[in-house]
């Protein structure tokens, strides 16, 4: 017993010196083995001490694994040390200025309108939380604090990942359709998204199966209400849900090239929309990308005629591609939305086509491949954060985009204002059927959470409906020039 007491005393002294450091704790086992080798401890006594030590280490590891801590990583994160359970608080604020080239109404004779007014705007203000628990479950809840009628729900979903290649999502979330839309508003290439974004399924209520079954590939297949954010189907005569799907491949990743992105994708959507939704059934009225003049007014179909179907069959097809190498990126998308419906007098099949092509260069050299994951692009992380004391660091990027919208199929007798309206068309399509826009942009990203963006947008209108025009301050306009500036913070 004296030998045991002496050995234990020696061991305790060693443990006191070791403290809580893992490397020193591991050396305790070596000391026990040395004492056995010198005959101070028998094999049985040493095994007993080592067994107790192993139990202590297991208990300490389990306690550490389940300990809850607070840290900052792209937001305030509360979670366990093993990362399996966490709650992350995040948000964004986008503060904009928009200035237009329209002439002022000096004599006050024009009708009161906000179109073309130079203005400051809180474009987005959102606060939310992402959560993860028990290995397989995650989700997000986000409130939009800049809504026109107060706060409303932006995102709310639960993701179930029992199998990584086959995951399930339920709630209100971004539908699997568009590369531009699936890129967060915190990370989009210009202040505003292109004309394409107006004719794709974005955030809707539904369910989705999705995943990345093979290296460099993704897929998503969803069922949704088809009526946009915070909106369920409300017309009992139209009970079909939208089916939405997207597949992508990054051939550079498939080939093991970590410096490039060779992304291609295809998407589709099919479902019915109610005639009772007014011009929203056709994608709504269309403003310029600079959020200025409304240059296209969609038709409105009466849903009260019992001799025709109350629904409009809406089919959307999208193609997308992105080629990036180092700090350079080329990207483009094309989408066609078809509206097939009938009235008591006629059958119509009208398409809206939109597309864009863009080129971007990160002057400070940050790689686009570092920002690509899961079929979409993330944000720029500067090589070094901006230091205002030395005026060094941060990332700079320039870009140019051309985009086009063509709603010329609505410029036809029966649907177009001034061309003999179908009796069931209560409001005909008016103003201009086509628009082309050039955007030139400059970004400064001092750190991963802050961005400053300056865009110049030049938009031309073409092919008017029955002589209808865009009027701003009493003057007929065929183009719009705008300067956009954004200061944003995201955490």
Image (spheres, grey):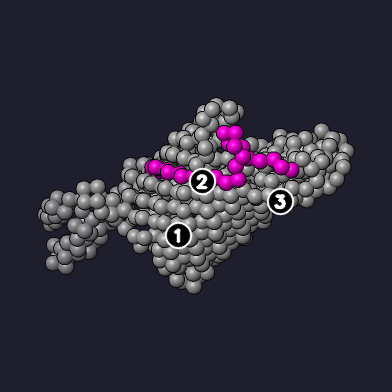
Q: Which residue sits at x=54%, y=59%?
A: 357
- Residue 221 in percent (x, y) is at 63, 54
Could you tell me how far apart the alpha carbons at marks 1 and 3 are, in whole angstroms? 30 Å
Front disc: 1 or 3: 3
Question: What range is drawn magenta here?
Answer: 466-491
The C terminus sits in image quarter: top left
Left or right: residue 348 compared with residue 334? right
Could you tell me how far apart the alpha carbons at marks 2 and 3 are, in whole angstroms? 23 Å
To which residue does mark 2 refer? 481
Residue 105: say if magenta: no
To which residue does mark 3 refer? 408
Q: Where is 269 relative to 226, above or below?
A: below
- Residue 71 in percent (x, y) is at 32, 44
- Mark 2 nearby-residue class (10 Å; few <14, some 14–19, many ≥20): many
- Residue 199 in percent (x, y) is at 63, 48
* Predominant SS along the magenta part: strand
**Residue at the farthest front position:** 107
Q: Which mark is residue 360?
A: 1
Could you tell me how far apart the alpha carbons at marks 2 and 1 are, in whole angstroms? 21 Å
The N terminus sits in image quarter: bottom left
Chain-order first, disc 2 or disc 1: 1
Left or right: residue 82 compared with residue 165? left
Left or right: residue 255 compared with residue 238? left
**Residue at the farthest bottom position:** 255
Give the quadrant of residue 293.
top right
- Callout 2: helix, strand or loop? strand
Chain-order first, disc 2 or disc 3: 3
Front disc: 2 or 1: 2
Chain-order first, disc 1 or disc 3: 1
- Mark 1 and 3 residues: CB-CB less than 8 Å, in contact? no
- Callout 3: helix, strand or loop? helix
């Amino acid at each position: 017993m004296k030998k045991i007491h002496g050995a234990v005393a020696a061991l305790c002294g060693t443990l006191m010196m070791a403290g809580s450091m893992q490397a020193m704790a591991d050396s305790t086992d070596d000391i026990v083995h040395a004492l056995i080798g010198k005959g101070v401890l028998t094999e049985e006594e040493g095994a007993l001490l080592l067994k107790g030590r192993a139990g202590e280490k297991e208990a300490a590891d389990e306690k550490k694994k389940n300990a809850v801590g607070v840290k900052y990583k792209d937001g305030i994160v509360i979670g366990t040390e093993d990362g399996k359970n966490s709650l992350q608080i995040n948000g964004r604020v986008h503060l904009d200025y928009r200035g237009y080239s329209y002439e002022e109404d000096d004599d006050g004779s024009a009708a009161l309108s906000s179109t073309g007014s130079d203005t400051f705007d809180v474009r987005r203000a959102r606060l939310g939380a992402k959560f993860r628990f028990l290995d397989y479950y995650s989700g997000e809840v986000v409130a939009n604090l800049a809504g026109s009628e107060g706060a409303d729900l932006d995102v709310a979903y639960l993701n179930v990942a029992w199998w990584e290649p086959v995951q399930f999502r339920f709630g209100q979330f971004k539908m699997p359709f568009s590369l531009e839309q699936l890129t967060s508003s915190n990370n989009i290439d210009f202040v505003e998204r292109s004309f394409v974004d107006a004719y794709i399924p974005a955030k809707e209520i539904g369910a989705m199966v999705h995943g990345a079954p093979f290296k460099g590939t993704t897929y998503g297949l969803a069922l949704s209400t088809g009526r946009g954010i915070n909106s369920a189907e409300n017309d009992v005569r139209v009970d079909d849900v939208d089916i939405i799907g997207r597949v992508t491949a990054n051939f550079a990743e498939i080939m093991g090239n970590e410096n490039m992105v060779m992304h291609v994708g295809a998407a589709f959507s099919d479902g019915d929309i109610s005639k009772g939704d007014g011009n929203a059934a056709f994608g709504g009225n269309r403003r310029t990308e600079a959020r200025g003049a409304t240059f296209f007014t969609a038709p409105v179909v009466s849903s009260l005629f019992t001799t025709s179907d109350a629904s409009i069959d809406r089919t959307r097809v999208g193609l997308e591609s992105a080629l990036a190498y180092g700090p350079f990126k080329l990207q483009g998308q094309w989408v066609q939305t078809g509206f097939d419906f009938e009235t008591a007098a006629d059958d119509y099949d009208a398409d809206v086509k939109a597309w864009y092509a863009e080129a971007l260069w990160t002057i400070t050299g940050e790689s686009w491949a570092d920002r690509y994951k899961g079929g979409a692009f993330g944000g720029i992380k500067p090589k070094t954060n901006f230091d205002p004391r030395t005026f060094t660091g941060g990332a700079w990027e320039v870009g140019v985009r051309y985009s086009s919208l063509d709603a010329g199929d609505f410029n036809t007798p029966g649907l177009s204002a001034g061309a003999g309206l179908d009796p069931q068309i209560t409001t005909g399509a008016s103003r201009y059927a086509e628009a082309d826009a050039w955007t030139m942009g400059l970004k400064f990203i001092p750190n991963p959470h802050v961005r400053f963006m300056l865009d110049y947008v030049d938009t031309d209108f073409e092919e008017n409906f029955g002589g209808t025009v865009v009027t701003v301050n009493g003057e007929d306009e065929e183009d719009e020039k705008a300067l956009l500036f954004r200061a944003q913070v995201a955490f």
